[in-house]
Amino acid sequence: MRVLIATPECFPFVTTGGLGEMVSGFVKALARCGYDVHVGLPLYGTLHPNGDWTKTDRIAVPFDGGIRLCSVWTHGSEGVTYHFIEYHAYFGGSNIYGGVNEGERFAFFCCALLAMCEAFCCLPDVIHAHDWTTALLPVYLNTTLTHTPLRQTATVFTIHNLNYQGLFSPSLLYRAGIPMSEFRSDRLEALGYVNFLKGALYHATKLTTVSPHYAKEIQTPSFGCGLDDVLRFKAADLIGILNGIDTVRWDPSNDPSIAAHYTYHNLEPKETCKQALRQALQLTNEPVPLFGVVSRLCEQKGLDVLLEILPHLLRNLSMQLVVMGSSEPSWEARLHDLERNFPNRLRVKIGYEADLAHKIYAGCDFCVMPSRFEPCGLNQMYALRYGMLPIVRETGGLADTVENCDEINGRGCGFVFRDLTNDALYNTVGWACATYFDRPQLFRTLQQNAMKRDFGWERSVHAYEEVYRWAVERRRGG
């Protein structure tokens, strides 16, 4: 089966977070299962093709009432073929998202990918579109391309974060070449705007999202972001499949970024990683647990609640905390103020450093993730892989991946709370501290439980294989 993965991001070429990481691991696992895997990406200005990439010029793309010519750069790696759409007017800059013509940019990207398929005579059995930026692909296949060879191609659309939908002026439909008949409430119209993601919900052959718990949540008004009624209508075609992680890049037994290597059979070297992290961050060496946050610092992640209770945590509990991420300046200023007030308790690193992220997972005892909503989450999986016990709110993928501590039977791999309140988060961090100090054998058992959990891609890929088969059979009337 030939599959085209359409995405705005893919590690290591370009990524801003979980989407790029997810696609990277997924496509390599899919190729290992014998699929003919192609990935379509924009060629952003930050990407520079090198000698082993090939270029195809003059791909004709119908757009904005005429024909535009783009180029396609192709590169193969680990059984996957990557295609990069080069069109400087839309993608020549360094920005991945944003700008006044964002909808136009990604509408063109979708058109260009479909034109590339026809020009290369490379017709996929399935186009698997990721995120709102590729959501017009199922729309095109069901409207303007129904009398072309692509009419046999099934579509699978994955919702990574329903909060981002792609809302634009109705005039964009003309430029994108989509019939105005699609501008209605049971297709692309929402609150007077064109809603890219809503179009995919109606037109895709099958829908997936990135965890089973999130698939249920988004069918409710609390998490549906205004589309819960559509998702309930499409519930029979919506499947929640948990993301995996790249267990080769994220492996404490041979990670080149960390001070010592360890497994769940022998966790003693993790203490060396802890001391090395403290030394690198100039934290005092104290017999206290080390907590870590590696995250975007925003309300979705519940970090406004953490900021509220942080002075009390650092003052009242024997603990240290490392925070790495970026946010709006006012949040960053508050964190730096707290760092100055608690110089032996808190370290703040603004931005993201991949090497330091590995060191934090290896060196910390606990990971704090009090998210308001979390479609899947990868950070808790990395943490578990490194024996760093997550403290999480019971939502989305966090609920699917972190089993709450059972002190009686020694089961679980983290600490879970339900309501996002100051008291709930404070008490759960306190529970983790008490476990560390008062029940060291239970703490070690939880670490071993965490490291034994399998978050490799193989199981999830088999679930996607089944979705692909269903989609192809439905598309072709099988």
Image (cartoon, rainbow, N blue to C red):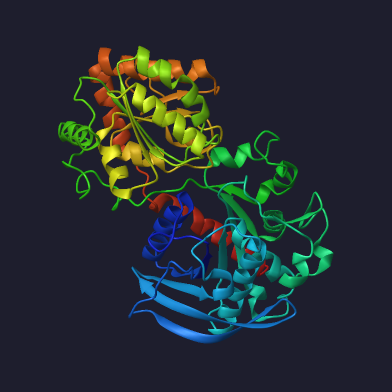
Please give the name of the residue rendered at 59% of the width and 57% of the height, measured from the top-left corner. 98
Task: Estimate the x, y position of residue 272 in percent, counting from the top left.
Answer: 15, 34
**Residue 478 in sight:** no
Please give the name of the residue rendered at 25% of the width and 20% of the height, measured from the top-left corner. 288
Q: Specify the quadrant that holds the C terminus.
A: bottom right
In the rendered image of this protein, does residue 241 appear above or below residue 402?
below
Task: Estimate the x, y position of residue 146 in percent, counting from the top left.
Answer: 72, 75
Residue that sits furthest to the bottom in the current view: 58
Q: Nearer the viewer, residue 441 or 223?
A: 223
Task: Estimate the x, y position of residue 220 in percent, counting from the top left.
Answer: 68, 36
Please tell me in which quadrant of the rendered image residue 342 appears. top left
In the rendered image of this protein, does residue 475 appear above or below residue 466?
below
Q: Is residue 85 left or right of residue 288?
A: right
Q: Nearer the viewer, residue 87 or 329?
A: 329
In the rendered image of this protein, does residue 292 appear above or below residue 31?
above
Please tell me in which quadrant of the rendered image residue 472 appears. bottom right
In the rendered image of this protein, does residue 365 appear above or below residue 115?
above
Task: Estimate the x, y position of residue 248 in percent, counting from the top left.
Answer: 28, 53
Please tell me in which quadrant of the rendered image residue 421 appears. top right
